[in-house]
Amino acid sequence: HVQLVESGGGSVQAGGSLTLSCAASGNIFNTHCVAWFRQAPGKEREGVAVIYTDGVTIYYDDSVKGRFTISRDNAKNTVYLQMNSLLPEDTAMYYCAEDRFACLKGQNSRLDRNEYKVWGQGTQVTVS
């Protein structure tokens, strides 16, 4: 069973940047899509960005489009989320998740938290 470990969270001022990392315990990127989600207190977990197995097909939630960039390093089994121009409303616990099929079911599934079975423990991002 693959394990995911997030890191890179922290506290920044509005307008600042952070880069989150999601390290996988195995080489899954060629067969599993990986997504970043976030959950703010009192709110549901929402999908932020997803990268497909080809490493090229990428989708973002409208709330982060143009500010966040998802990428991966196959040699390091790591997916990144570069976050620029951070806003206070970006404050949340950020999670990465992977699944073999989530990206194959259409646009309604690729950022649906219910489609992902393996999750990391999360990393906190606070923007003030």
Image (spheres, grey):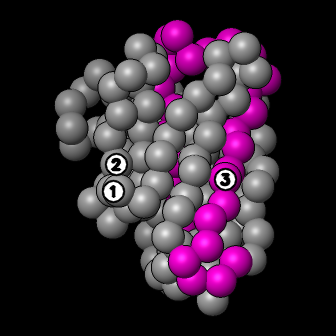
Is residue 73 shown left or right of residue 46? right
Q: Is residue 17 magenta?
A: yes
Disc nearer the start of the sequence (2/3): 3
- Disc on res. 60: 2
Determine the CA span between mark 1 and mark 3. Answer: 15 Å
Q: Amino acid at mark 3?
A: Thr
Residue nearest the viewer, comparing 6 with 85:
85
Q: Which residue is under mark 1? A: 65
Determine the CA span between mark 2 and mark 3. Answer: 16 Å
Q: In which quarter of the view is residue 73 placed? A: top right
Q: Amino acid at mark 1?
A: Lys
Residue 77 drawn above or below residue 128:
above
Q: Secondary structure at mark 3?
A: strand
User: For the point 72% across and 14% down, which residue is it?
Assistant: 75
Label 3: few (<14), some (14–19) or many (≥20) C-alpha neighbours in 10 Å: some
Q: Which residue is under mark 3? A: 19
Mark 2 vs mark 3, foreground winner is 3
Q: Which residues are magenta?
A: 12-41
Residue 107 drawn above or below residue 56:
below
Disc nearer the start of the sequence (2/1): 2
User: For the point 69% across and 29% down, which residue is it?
Assistant: 78
Name the quarter where the C terminus is drawn.
bottom right
Q: Is residue 35 magenta?
A: yes
Residue 45, position in %: x, y? 47, 63
Mark 2 vs mark 1, foreground winner is 1
Q: Are marks 2 and 1 in contact (CB under 8 Å)?
A: yes
